[in-house]
Amino acid sequence: GAWNPDMNYASACFYKDAPVTKNNGVKWNSYLSAESECTWYGSRCDGATHISQIALRENNLVGVIPTELGYLTNLRALVLDKNLLSGEIPDAVFVAKAVTGATSGTLDNGSIYLSKLKQLILGNNSFTGNIPTALGLLPKLSVLYLGNNKLGGYIP
């Protein structure tokens, strides 16, 4: 497929810190090669050009979710449950403008990055902070699993 700098950058940000997985010794250095993101372990594309799914369940992933994932505008499923991910789930992954008022803490509907996202499965990690308010702005989100984390707040 055609090279897409935003997709390449976003994908590389996500995959760069992933360790060698326990699953069949898969190496995580594909992002350094000329290989298409569509052939990387755990990613699936619609056609040959846009990542539509990242499914890396139970792969010993560590670190945080990079805000650059928002550049994957055709992403329909993000499945990262049963890993060692931590930190807050950033609103900036989902929307361009996070806060409309310093005291209200409400989100505005500016640019919704992951408007095609249908499944967000992040359970059984070590995420902290509040459940992102921006999740309420995702028009197609139908499956949400955040259980067994250290999240507060409510599902918008």
Image (cartoon, rainbow, N blue to C red):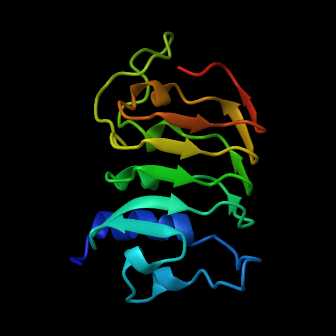
Instruction: Determine the residue located farthest toward the left in the rendered image.
Output: 2
Residue 53 locus on image (x, y percent): 45, 59
Residue occupying the point 47% across, 80% down: 31
Q: Measured along the vertical axis of the image, is residue 24 above or below residue 51? A: below
Q: Nearer the viewer, residue 31 or 142?
A: 142
Residue occupying the point 39% across, 86% down: 35
Q: Is residue 18 left or right of residue 90?
A: right
Q: Measured along the vertical axis of the image, is residue 104 above or below residue 91? A: above
Instruction: Determine the residue located farthest toward the bottom in the rendered image.
Output: 34
Residue 32 locus on image (x, y percent): 47, 85
Instruction: Determine the residue located farthest toward the top in the rendered image.
Output: 104
Residue occupying the point 28% across, 29% down: 110
Q: Where, by quadrant of the figure, is residue 88 drawn? A: top right
Q: Quadrant of the N terminus?
A: bottom left
Residue 83 locus on image (x, y percent): 73, 57
Is residue 23 in sight in this rendering? yes
Q: Where, by quadrant of the figure, is residue 107 drawn? A: top left
Residue 69 locus on image (x, y percent): 45, 54
Q: Is residue 3 left or right of residue 81?
A: left
Q: Is residue 66 left or right of residue 46?
A: right
Residue occupying the point 72% across, 84% down: 24
Is residue 66 in sight in this rendering? no
Q: Is residue 2 left or right of residue 131?
A: left
Q: How many marks?
A: 0
Q: Where, by quadrant of the figure, is residue 151 drawn? A: top right
